[in-house]
């Protein structure tokens, strides 16, 4: 049955080193002049400056100058005695040949204290070596629901705050994942069916399965629900256009809340399709080896197009505190609505231009904070975005493990799955303290 209510994450994000970007100026060459100083205002000599593909170093007075043509661009300033400085430079609303920046670097001791979480604050949540944790969901009461395998058997297990098992039930082999819908109901997903789970009479149980086809997509398309309204989305134009629709539950009236699309990407896909697509029947009607070779190449192009080239636009909607936020990464903007669907304001966003952006936002379970996810050389970094000013207030480096899976945040902890490098068949569940 349709059970809709909001699931997870939210927030808005900004990161403009200066002012609003105008797409018309994204290819305009600009001169960037800046100065680098320490916390006392003294200039820093020989700091390394990198802006996009341009490099420079500061002189005796801490000044630097360079040119760049692509904006927004990540500004990185490094020095052996100071913590790395990162910011985003964007073109001003009015065309300018020169952009000025001012960089204040902090000592490494302070940076390590504020950003790096010590190993003592990283915990093995479910320390049973033979258990493979396939997926998990953090719960509001402090517990965790696990989907796991143990000695060739598969289980749903609930844990308490201390990580001790409280309930379990056996399940079919080889589930795909757990999924929490917009009504906070949790489902166990297989390749052919989906089961709703619940705690009944202090026991963990699963309900009658439903065919996966249609139901799963229907559940995922609902991103918010309260007693009065429901918000759902639909993808069109080869997943390059997303439309959010607000539905009044009582009157059943619907209206378009927001439309986001990447017209350039869609046009390029259409051109690729017209050049490389042919009917699959070509493989069966080839008259000689040369025609068969051509038909196979066309078929390979089609598979590449459908499996690799087509990536849905990432324009998510999240609930944050008392508002709904839509983050339009295609158009570098975020739009804020009331929960009744009234537009409140909009602002530019640029955090997704930082190096290593994973095309992913994660909010905490309480729906009060949002983090942008990055991965460089396998190491994951979370940047918390301040909804008041759009600046990065807090950076968390999850440095103990690489290539983390399914990051979730509750309270002051980030939870994630990690594959043991000695045995890739085993996933372990860890949590790391997030220092305020």
Image (cartoon, rainbow, N blue to C red):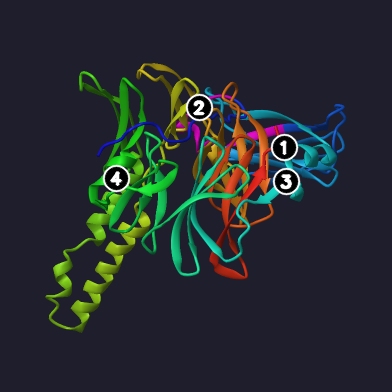
Q: Callout 1: few (<14), some (14-19), or many (20+) C-alpha neighbours within 10 Å?
A: some
Residue at left 36%, top 31%?
A: 5
| Residue 342 found in image quarter | top left
* Marks 2 and 3 in Cβ contact (< 8 Å): no
**Which dot, 1 or 3, sits closer to the camera?**
3
Tell me where the magenta segment starts and ends, as one range.
Answer: 19-33
Q: Which one is earlier in the sequence, the residue at label 4 or at label 1?
A: 1
- The residue that label 4 is drawn on is 217
* Marks 4 and 1 in Cβ contact (< 8 Å): no
Left or right: 4, with 325 as reference point: left
Toward the front, the furthest residue is 201
The residue tagged with tag 2: helix, strand or loop? strand
Q: Which mark is residue 65?
A: 1
Q: Which one is earlier in the sequence, the residue at label 2 or at label 3?
A: 3
- The residue that label 3 is drawn on is 121
Q: Indicate whether residue 28 is drawn in magenta.
A: yes
Q: Is residue 393 above or below residue 286?
A: above
**Which dot, 4 or 3, sits closer to the camera?**
3
Residue in front for this viewpoint, 430 or 207: 207
- The residue that label 2 is drawn on is 348
Separation of disc 4 and disc 1 at Cα? Answer: 51 Å
Q: Callout 2: few (<14), some (14-19), or many (20+) C-alpha neighbours within 10 Å?
A: many
Q: Which one is earlier in the sequence, the residue at label 1 or at label 2?
A: 1
**Which dot, 4 or 1, sits closer to the camera?**
4
Residue in front for this viewpoint, 217 or 177: 177
| Residue 176 found in image quarter | bottom left
Whether residue 311 appears in this view of the structure is no
**Which dot, 2 or 3, sits closer to the camera?**
3
Residue at left 67%, top 46%?
A: 397
Q: Indicate whether residue 1 is drawn in magenta.
A: no
The residue tagged with tag 3: helix, strand or loop? helix
Left or right: 277, with 33 as reference point: left
């Amino acid at each position: 049955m349709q059970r809709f209510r909001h699931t997870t994450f939210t927030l808005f994000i900004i990161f403009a080193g200066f002012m609003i970007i105008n797409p018309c100026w994204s290819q305009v060459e600009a001169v960037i002049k800046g100065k680098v100083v320490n916390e006392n205002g003294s200039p820093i000599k020989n700091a390394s400056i990198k802006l996009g593909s341009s490099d420079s170093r500061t002189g005796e007075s801490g000044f630097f100058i360079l040119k760049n043509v692509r904006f927004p661009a990540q500004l990185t300033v490094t020095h052996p005695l100071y913590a790395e400085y990162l910011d985003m430079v964007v073109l001003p609303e009015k065309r300018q040949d020169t952009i000025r920046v001012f960089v204040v670097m902090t000592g490494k001791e302070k940076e390590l204290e504020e950003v790096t979480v010590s190993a003592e604050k990283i915990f093995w949540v479910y320390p049973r070596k033979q258990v493979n944790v396939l997926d998990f969901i953090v719960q509001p009461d402090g517990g965790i629901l696990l989907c796991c395998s143990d000695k060739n058997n598969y289980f749903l297990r609930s844990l308490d705050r201390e990580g001790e098992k409280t309930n379990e039930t056996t399940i079919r082999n080889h589930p795909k994942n757990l999924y929490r819908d917009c009504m906070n109901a949790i489902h166990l997903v297989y390749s052919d069916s989906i089961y709703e789970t619940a705690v009944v009479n202090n026991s963990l149980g699963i309900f009658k399965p439903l065919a996966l086809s249609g139901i799963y997509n229907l559940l995922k398309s609902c991103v918010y629900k309260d007693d009065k309204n429901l918000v759902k989305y639909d993808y069109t134009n080869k997943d390059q256009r997303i439309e959010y629709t607000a539905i009044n539950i009582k009157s059943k009236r619907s209206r378009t809340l927001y439309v986001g699309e990447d017209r350039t990407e869609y046009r390029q896909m259409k051109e690729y399709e017209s050049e490389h697509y042919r009917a699959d029947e070509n493989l069966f009607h080839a008259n000689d080896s040369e025609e068969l070779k051509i038909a196979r190449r066309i078929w390979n192009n089609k598979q590449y197009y459908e499996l690799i080239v087509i990536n849905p636009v990432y324009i998510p909607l999240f609930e944050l505190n008392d508002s709904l936020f839509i983050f339009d990464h295609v158009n570098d903007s975020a739009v804020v609505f009331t929960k009744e669907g009234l537009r409140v304001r909009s602002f530019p966003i640029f955090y997704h231009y930082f190096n290593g952006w994973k095309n992913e936002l994660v909010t905490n379970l309480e729906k009060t904070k949002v983090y942008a996810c990055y991965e460089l050389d396998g190491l994951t970094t979370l940047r918390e975005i301040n909804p008041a000013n759009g600046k990065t207030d807090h950076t968390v480096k999850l440095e103990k493990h690489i290539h983390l899976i399914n990051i979730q945040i509750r309270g002051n902890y980030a939870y994630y799955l990690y594959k043991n490098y000695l045995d890739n068949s085993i996933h372990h569940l860890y949590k790391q303290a997030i220092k305020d």
